[in-house]
Amino acid sequence: MNFEALPKIKHTNANNFFLLAGPCAIEGEDMALRIAEKVVAITDALKIPYVFKGSFKKANRSRVDSFTGIGDEKALKILQKVSRTFDIPTVTDIHEISDAAMAAEYVDVLQIPAFLVRQTDLVVAAAKTGKVVNLKKGQFISPEAMKHAVAKVQDSGNQHAWITDRGTMFGYQDMIVDFRGIPTMRQYAPTILDVTHSLQQPNQSVGVTGGRPEMIETIARAGVVNNVDGLFIETHFDPKNAKSDGANMLDLSQLEELLSRLVAIRKTIQNF
């Protein structure tokens, strides 16, 4: 795993999985700093390379009255403050071509949402910023097809692409993780398992996505055993009152215990 494009990332010699973690959306400065401070302390103790995650806006909501953000520039400046305060890299997702250059001024990794990963112009715009591009595997895309998304980044002159598996549609209202896809996608780029989004239950009749957070450790353990390069975990100190995706986020109070067990598993499998 090469982190040359992320000079702020730490513990790269620990031979651990790396972690993208934070709230689904930036709700305000205090909450972002509070979550980052806790995760930084945990990852420093466990020597896990860490990237803070937070969406500066949410464009893919089920209902028009759902929370979408506190303002683009305001949220991006909060992400920048998190990075400067804790000396860590940050990642946010983009939804429009114009978002790429704007977000690249504030964050280190640009994430392409799963629903948009086939949008060539968006992927190319992200790649041309020179930032790391994290490609979420579409719920409707095979692992093998992700090589084409990676190629779009590379053909744009950017060699820093990641792939994140966030589950595959199973019927209309459920997701599954096909762990056979991990070794396939690792042939194309470093591969991350998005644990929390893999446990979403989309398309609920009320227009708010459900989730199964009680299965977070089960999915995360399987990912580590199957040699994912990184884990993606959305976390919040009050998931029930989070303004976005609270149904499948991990309570921040449970993160340290979970990561401790996952690091122990990682160390064990390295002996095989």
Image: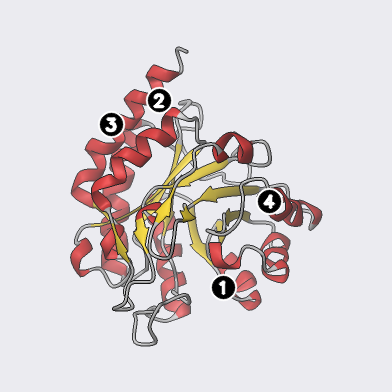
Which corner quadrant of the image does residue 209 belong to? bottom left
Q: Which residue is mark 4?
A: 145
For disc 1, the marked residue is 95
* Mark 2 vs mark 3, CA separation in Å: 10 Å
Q: Position of residue 194 (x, y in %)?
A: 44, 49
Q: Is residue 134 left or right of residue 50?
A: right
Question: In the picture provided, is 208 more to the left or to the right than 187?
Answer: left
The residue nearer to you, when weighing 236 against 83, is: 236
SS of the residue under disc 1:
loop
Label 2 or label 4, whichever comes before in sequence order: 4
Mark in the foreground, 4 or 3:
4
Badge 1 amino acid: His
**How much space separates mark 2 and mark 1, taking CA atoms?**
34 Å
Relative vertical location of residue 143 with respect to residue 138 in this rendering, above or below: above
Q: Are marks 4 and 1 in contact (CB under 8 Å)?
A: no
Disc 2 residue type (three-letter): Arg
Which residue does the numbered mark 2 point to in the structure image?
266
Q: Secondary structure at mark 2?
A: helix
Vertical arrangement, residue 249 with respect to residue 105, above or below: above
Residue at the disc numbered 3:
260
**In the picture shown, does residue 260 fall above or below 167?**
above
In-image side of 72 versus 70 (left or right): right
Give the Cα distance between marks 4 and 1. Answer: 21 Å
